[in-house]
Image: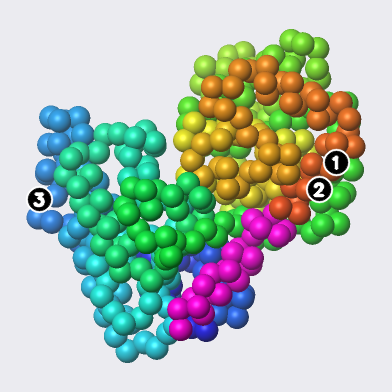
């Protein structure tokens, strides 16, 4: 099988979108697919765009987004069309709507993404400030993209349902295939068994791994750790990715590492050690399209504590690879669950091993690209 893989940024840039395009395209190649890259596309915006954007920001307190601009999208699609003019391939695959929204060709177009614009509007805070013009153009681009796609693949049921319910897409072209963990060298099953065996038995270790404190529920994590500590439970909360400015002095049960890059050797090793040692990844997001961090935690045999919102329900399954809670769950609900699981370490070990099996069978890029290959084959 041969595909053209297109994305606006460099597909080999492991820093772009948390490395998702990099790991997705690399997994296709590892799965025997001949991948031609059409990436690093140039962006063209309408005349005086910056002036209009600045005026709208300061006068209307709204944002005109260059990401959701039809002129830009059409120019992206023109570049892709030029590149595929003499290219023979089975499909054009993109994790973004932008380069394929106005692409007209005889080759099947496949979208494999995490969310559509209407699903994010009013869900993610930055989208709340979009101007009426941006909203109209973003929805127009999305409709144009979905109408051209032979397959619209989403990593969660939530995103797939938004395509059907908000955009009226034919259910027959909609499929759900989860994204995988963005790890270059995932632990082996033997590694994970060793991690689990060596985790502390007399201390509850929680890990908050996120850049966004408010959206990812950092205040809830801190409140749960405080409640456990005050109830006499030995608890250690490690906060990674964000430095809470209000946390002075730092409580004795909290450790703060700051941001650790998994693309820096030292940071990568520290992250791996944290995941090897922790009992639970604790990220109770208030808004989340998917949550690759949950896949990565499962790769280390770490169950996830989170909320049932957005696409998380496709990733984290209760009592299998973690537990999801209501957005308005009281602090004691989290505490009771954690204490109950940890009081019988055999129960915890079973949950941790089941978490790894979830990664190994469902939340990895090899499994995902295998499923997408089959879907592409079904088009012929």
Q: Residue at x 39, y 88 (%)?
A: 88
Residue sitting at 79 percent across and 43 percent down?
352
Residue under label 1, please give it: 349
- Discs 2, 1 touching: Cβ within 8 Å: yes
* Numbered range of the magenta stretch: 359-380
Q: Earlier in the sequence, mark 3 or mark 2?
A: 3
Q: Left or right: 8 with respect to 191? A: left
Q: Is residue 194 left or right of residue 259?
A: right
Q: CA distance from mark 1 to mark 3?
A: 59 Å
Nearest the viewer among 351 and 227 is 351
Q: Residue at x 33, y 48 (%)?
A: 166
Label ID, residue 253? none
Q: How far across and how far down the image is residue 5, in percent?
A: 43, 72
Distance from label 2 to label 1 (Cα)?
Answer: 6 Å
Front of the two marks 3 and 2:
2
Where disc 2 sits, the SS reads helix
Where is mark 3, residue-wise? 48
Residue 101 at what x, y percent from top left?
28, 64
- Above/below status of 233 relative to 172: above
Say how the picture is coloured: rainbow
Q: Nearer the viewer, residue 66 or 252?
A: 66
Label 1 element class: helix
Can see residue 49?
A: yes
Q: Is residue 362 magenta?
A: yes
Q: Position of residue 150 (x, y in %)?
A: 38, 71
Element under label 3?
loop
186 relative to 284, above or below: below
Question: Dot 2 corresponds to which residue?
Answer: 353
Does the CB distance between marks 1 and 3 fall below 8 Å?
A: no
- Main SS of the magenta part reads helix
């Amino acid at each position: 099988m041969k595909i053209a893989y297109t994305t606006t940024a460099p597909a080999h840039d492991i820093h772009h979108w948390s490395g998702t395009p990099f790991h997705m395209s690399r997994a296709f190649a590892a799965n025997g697919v001949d991948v031609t890259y059409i990436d690093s596309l140039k962006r063209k915006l309408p005349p005086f765009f910056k002036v209009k954007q600045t005026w709208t920001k300061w006068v209307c307190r709204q944002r005109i987004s260059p990401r959701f601009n039809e002129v830009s999208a059409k120019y992206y699609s023109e570049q892709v069309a030029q590149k595929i003019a003499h290219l023979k391939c089975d499909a054009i695959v993109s994790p973004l709507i932008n380069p394929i929204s106005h692409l007209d060709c005889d080759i099947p177009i496949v979208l494999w993404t995490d969310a559509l614009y209407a699903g994010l509007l009013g869900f993610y805070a930055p989208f709340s400030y979009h101007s009426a013009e941006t909203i109209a153009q973003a929805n127009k681009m999305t409709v144009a993209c979905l109408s051209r796609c032979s397959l619209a693949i989403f990593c969660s049921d939530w995103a797939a349902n938004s395509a059907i319910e908000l955009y009226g897409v034919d259910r027959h072209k909609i499929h759900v295939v989860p994204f995988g963990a963005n790890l270059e060298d995932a632990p082996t099953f033997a590694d994970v068994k060793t991690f689990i065996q060596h985790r502390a038995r007399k201390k509850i270790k929680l890990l908050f791994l996120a850049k966004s404190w408010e959206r990812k529920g950092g205040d809830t994590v801190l409140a749960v750790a405080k409640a456990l500590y005050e109830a006499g439970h030995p608890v250690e909360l490690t906060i990674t990715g964000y430095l809470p400015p209000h946390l002075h002095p730092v409580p004795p049960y909290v450790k703060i590492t700051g941001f650790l890059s998994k693309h820096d050797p030292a940071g990568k090793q520290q992250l791996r050690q944290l995941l090897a040692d922790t009992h639970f990844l604790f990220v109770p997001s208030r808004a989340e399209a998917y949550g690759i961090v949950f896949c990565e935690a499962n790769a280390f045999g770490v169950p996830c504590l989170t909320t049932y919102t957005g696409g998380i329900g496709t990733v984290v399954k209760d009592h299998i690879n973690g537990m999801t809670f209501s957005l308005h769950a009281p602090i004691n609900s989290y505490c009771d669950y954690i204490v109950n699981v940890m009081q019988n370490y055999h129960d915890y070990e079973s949950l941790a091993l089941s978490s790894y099996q979830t990664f190994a069978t469902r939340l990895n890029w090899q499994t995902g690209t295998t499923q997408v290959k089959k879907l592409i084959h079904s088009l012929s």
